């Protein structure tokens, strides 16, 4: 990954000060969000001589990582999860914990002297001549460049089924799950077989909780490490190869590494992992033990849900099962239409950015993060932040003339 290493090396020097805290009307750029994407952009902009103001609706850096579930660890390795200009410490394990990610984000912001304006909830962004006007709940800001780094945590996708409003048990989205304690002695259904669903089911099963996974369709499972090497390394090494070729050559190796799954109620998807990410935005399960728990019977597997009953669920094969709690690990669907009500040509019909990390149809407006990536989203966020800062630097320079 020489490109990334070079990138990290050559931005190391930008730690000597980020002046995003001056006069608010003087900033070259406004960055919305102080998660990994927002602070990566703020740090990278210094290298391009830009003064960025970061607006964050919470009162801390990395607020979303603070509320993820307790046992969460990165499933991308630390060497590929650091942001531009500051690698994750070597004292961290290969797959850092949630607390370590939070600590890293705090240290990153401190190192680059990023001081966001907290409790600034951005409600609307609108074109205002050559500038962008950014309205929060209590102030307005103006700048030639706006970077939207708001992540997708605010957009949990909660599908509904017939009868789901009559369910008497506890029904939550995976983003609300913290740990297994409230579920001890209960029967829990986890809906969805992405990384959140797989890991929450594992967390519950490890606490000896009666756990079932509802898996609607065919799945892709990858080992987190292959031949002792993080799977992300393989994905990065193959990045320049065509998707069809990558999925074709990897299929037998993955099959061998993951082992048979059909007899445990899981169907292997015909679509390869990389195509699945690119076409459907679905990241395959990077297995950290879920499959072993399915094999030893600690996690039951069922098909899709047909309907809810007051005390459980009827599955698509009409099997009826009682549950005390249902956890929807059904992902997120970001929709930024409310934030950009009068800006055309940058969002899909559903409100997702058409491009992230690149120039959009609107001069000075960029999105960072917000898409799933086969090569790790944090890594991708770092690369996007560098690209956006370069584009923003050129744009502001031209703007100043
Ligand atoms: C459970 C989970 C595990 C993950 N694990 C990995 C992993 O192992 N490796 C990996 O590479 N990626 C992982 N990701 C994906 C991704 O890296 C993270 O979601 C990452 O936090 C995205 O960073 P972000 O800055 O884009 O968004 P966020 O971290 O969501 O930060 C966005 C920030 O914007 C703020 N904000 C939002 N709206 C507004 C507004 N209107 N006004 C002001 N502020 C606003 C929010 O408060 C928040 O602080 C994981 C994601 C999840 C959900």
Image (tube, rainbow, N blue to C red):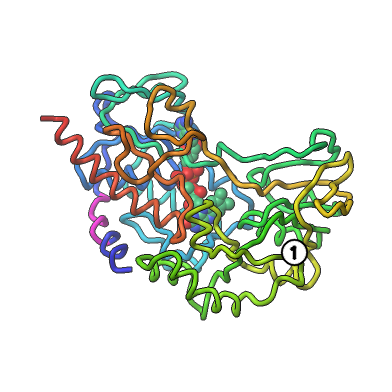
Query: What is the quadrant of the N terminus in the image?
Result: bottom left
User: Does the magenta-highlighted stretch encompass residue 11?
Assistant: yes
Residue positioned 43% across, 70% down in the render: 245
Residue positioned 58% across, 71% down in the render: 223
Residue positioned 35% across, 66% down in the render: 240
Query: What is the quadrant of the C terminus in the image?
Result: top left
Left or right of 195? Residue 76 is: left
Is residue 302 at least partly visible in the picture?
yes
User: Does the magenta-highlighted stretch encompass residue 318?
Assistant: no
Is residue 60 at least partly visible in the picture?
no
Q: Which residue is mark 1?
A: 206
Residue stretch rendered in magenta on the structure: 9-15
Give the image location of residue 108, x and y in percent. 38, 51
Label 1 neighbourhood size at 10 Å, few (<14), some (14-19), many (20+)? some
Residue positioned 45% across, 54% down in the render: 377
Give the image location of residue 286, x and y in percent. 58, 65
State the SS at label 1: helix
- Vertical arrangement, residue 222 with respect to residue 176, above or below: below
Q: Nearer the viewer, residue 55 or 253?
A: 253
Give the image location of residue 244, x and y in percent. 45, 66
Where, by quadrant of the figure, is residue 220 drawn?
bottom right
Q: Nearer the viewer, residue 339 or 175?
A: 339
Left or right of 281? Residue 210 is: right
């Amino acid at each position: 990954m020489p490109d990334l290493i070079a990138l990290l090396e050559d931005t190391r020097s930008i730690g000597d000060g980020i002046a995003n805290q001056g006069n608010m009307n003087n900033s070259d750029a406004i960055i919305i969000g102080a998660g990994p994407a927002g602070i990566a952009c703020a740090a990278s902009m210094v290298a391009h001589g830009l003064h960025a103001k970061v607006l964050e609706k919470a009162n801390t850096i990395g607020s979303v990582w603070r509320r993820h579930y307790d046992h969460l660890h990165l499933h991308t390795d630390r060497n590929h999860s650091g942001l531009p200009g500051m690698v994750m410490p070597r004292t961290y394990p290969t797959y850092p914990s949630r607390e370590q990610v939070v600590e890293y984000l705090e240290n990153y912001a401190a190192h680059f002297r990023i001081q966001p304006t907290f409790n600034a909830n951005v409600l609307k962004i609108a074109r205002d001549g050559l500038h962008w006007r950014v309205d929060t709940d209590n102030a307005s800001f103006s700048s030639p460049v706006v970077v939207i780094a708001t992540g997708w945590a605010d957009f949990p996708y909660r599908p509904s089924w017939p009868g789901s409003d009559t369910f008497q048990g506890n029904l939550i989205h995976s983003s609300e799950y913290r740990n297994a304690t409230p579920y001890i002695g209960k029967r829990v259904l986890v809906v969805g077989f992405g990384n959140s669903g797989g890991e929450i089911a594992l967390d519950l099963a490890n606490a000896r909780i009666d756990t079932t996974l509802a898996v609607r369709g065919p799945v892709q499972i990858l080992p987190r490490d292959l031949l002792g090497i993080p799977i992300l390394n393989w994905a990065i090494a193959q990045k320049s190869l065509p998707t069809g070729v990558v999925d074709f050559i990897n299929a037998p190796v993955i099959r061998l590494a993951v082992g048979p799954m059909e007899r445990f109620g899981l169907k292997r998807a015909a679509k390869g992992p990389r195509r699945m990410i690119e076409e459907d935005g679905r990241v395959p399960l990077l297995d950290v033990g879920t499959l072993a728990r399915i094999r030893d019977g600690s996690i039951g597997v069922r098909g899709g849900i047909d309907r809810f009953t007051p005390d459980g669920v009827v599955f698509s094969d009409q099997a009826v099962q009682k549950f005390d709690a249902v956890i929807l690990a059904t992902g997120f669907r970001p929709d930024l239409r409310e934030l950009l009500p009068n800006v055309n040509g940058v969002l899909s019909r559903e409100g997702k950015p058409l491009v992230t990390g690149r120039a959009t149809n609107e001069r000075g407006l960029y999105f960072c993060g917000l898409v799933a990536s086969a090569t790790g989203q944090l890594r991708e966020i770092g690369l996007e932040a560098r690209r956006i800062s370069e584009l923003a630097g050129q744009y502001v320079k031209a703007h100043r003339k």
